[in-house]
């Protein structure tokens, strides 16, 4: 895996990441740090990556378990250390899983497997942050 980060110029603090898979991600700093608020902060992209990683796992595990999953969203709320390095100290993952007749134990199992075994991003963040998970099941409309 590889990634190249390019600064977009002397008049701001915006950067573009070019990933090894051929995609780009824009990032920018806060105005008080010289940025122009044109894109997510780098730490927001770290948080988003953890959310995407675990959502991917949960959907895949539920599909493989023959659950009729129709939607999955994860809201992450994080706290950071007050002083540098301002690592994440707490992260709460709240899953909303939508489907037909989803079994609560299957949803809980999928979330636990992601958290404990498969989601590299959240497991890595768990080295500095207290991580919690909760979830809601929503019955899909017919």
Image (cartoon, rainbow, N blue to C red):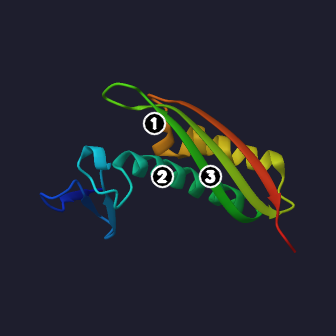
**Residue labelled with disc 1:** 125
The residue closer to the viewer here, 81 or 106, is: 81
Give residue 62's mark.
none
Q: Secondary structure at mark 3?
A: strand
Q: Nearer the viewer, mark 3 or mark 1?
A: 3
User: Is the C-beta separation of discs 2 and 1 under 8 Å?
Assistant: no
Task: Give coordinates of residue 89: x percent, y percent.
Answer: 48, 28
Choose the circle earlier in sequence order: 2 or 1: 2
The residue closer to the viewer here, 40 or 100, is: 40
Task: Give coordinates of residue 58: x percent, y percent.
Answer: 64, 53
Q: CA distance from mark 3 to mark 1?
A: 16 Å
Q: Secondary structure at mark 1?
A: helix
Choose the circle earlier in sequence order: 2 or 3: 2
**Residue labelled with disc 3:** 74
> Viewed as shown, does residue 135 lie left or right of 87?
right
> Viewed as shown, does residue 21 lie left or right of 100?
left
Residue at x 46% of width, y 52% of height: 49
Give residue 48's mark.
2
Q: Residues within 10 Å of mark 1 (few under 14, many from 20)?
A: some
Q: Secondary structure at mark 2?
A: helix
User: Is the C-beta separation of discs 3 and 1 under 8 Å?
Assistant: no
Q: Quadrant of residue 21?
A: bottom left
């Amino acid at each position: 895996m590889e990634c190249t980060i390019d600064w977009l110029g002397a008049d701001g603090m915006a950067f573009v990441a070019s990933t090894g898979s051929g995609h780009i991600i824009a990032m920018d700093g806060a105005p008080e740090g010289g940025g122009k608020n044109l894109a997510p902060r780098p730490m927001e992209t770290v948080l988003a990556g953890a959310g995407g990683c675990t959502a991917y796992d949960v959907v895949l595990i539920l599909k493989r378990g023959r659950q009729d999953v129709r939607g999955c969203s994860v809201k992450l709320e994080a706290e950071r250390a007050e002083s540098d390095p301002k690592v994440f100290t707490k992260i709460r993952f709240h899953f909303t899983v939508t489907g037909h007749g989803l079994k609560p134990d299957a949803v809980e199992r999928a979330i636990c497997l992601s958290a404990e075994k498969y989601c590299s991003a959240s497991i890595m963040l768990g080295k500095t942050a207290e991580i919690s998970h909760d979830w809601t099941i929503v019955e899909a409309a017919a």
